Amino acid sequence: MNNTIINRRSLRGALFVLALSSAGPALAVATGDSSDIAFHGTLKIHPCHINNDRDLSINFDNVGVHKVDGQRYKQAISYQLVCDDIDPTWRLTMIVKGNAASFDTSALSTNATGLAIQILQNGQPFEINKALDITYQNPPTLEAVPVKDPNVSELGEGAFSATATLLAEYL
């Protein structure tokens, strides 16, 4: 008789566990509404405009072949910098992109052998193709000056030119 009671209790426990396990997934099923989520935005470049997007031109006129010393003929590169959608937390850089002279990383090569145009920012050499951090409220003063390759004994006569791109951008 004792055996029967134990079996009934075991049977009841098994039925209870079975009832819970079969009811468990039914209780875990969620019901309710669903809704799609749409995301929208605009990708923008925060452009800066140099000289109202017009080319800058520096004319050195006549340069004496024996007078190129990195000081004479220095000229200001006058430009205006206007940036759209200014945010003071953004990093603003300026870069002069061009072909650097083999003898001076802050000078643009020209079409005249041994002659380059050095770029200065606030009186210091401005390395070509290297970004410089600047502040919008106080952009650097830029200058250009003819320089001679020290390995060339004498410059030849003739017209010379160099080109570069001045770029300011937020990163």
Image (cartoon, rainbow, N blue to C red):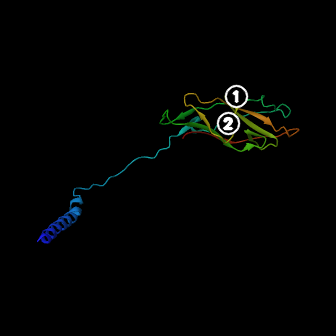
Q: Where does the image place residue 41, in percent across and percent down from the top left?
A: 40, 47
Reading the image, the residue beneath label 1 is: 123
**Of callouts 2 and 1, the N-terminal one:** 2
Q: Is residue 45 left or right of residue 102?
A: left
Q: Secondary structure at mark 1?
A: loop
What number is the disc on residue 37?
none
What residue does disc 2 label? 57
Residue 125 rendering spot, x and y as whole percentages: 71, 33
Taking depth in this image into account, of 82 and 64 the one nearest to the observer is 82
Left/right of residue 114 with respect to residue 56 in the rendered view: right
User: Label 1 crowding class (10 Å Cα cut-off): few <14, some 14-19, many 20+?
Assistant: few
Q: Amino acid at mark 1?
A: Gly
Helix, strand or loop at mark 2? loop
**Residue ID at (55%, 37%):** 49
Quarter residue 126 falls in:
top right
Residue 124: x and y, percent? 70, 30
Residue lying furthest front in this view?
Answer: 2
**Labels 2 & 1 near each other (Cβ < 8 A):** no
User: Residue 170 at x, y = what percent?
Assistant: 54, 39
The kind of residue on which mark 2 rests is Ser
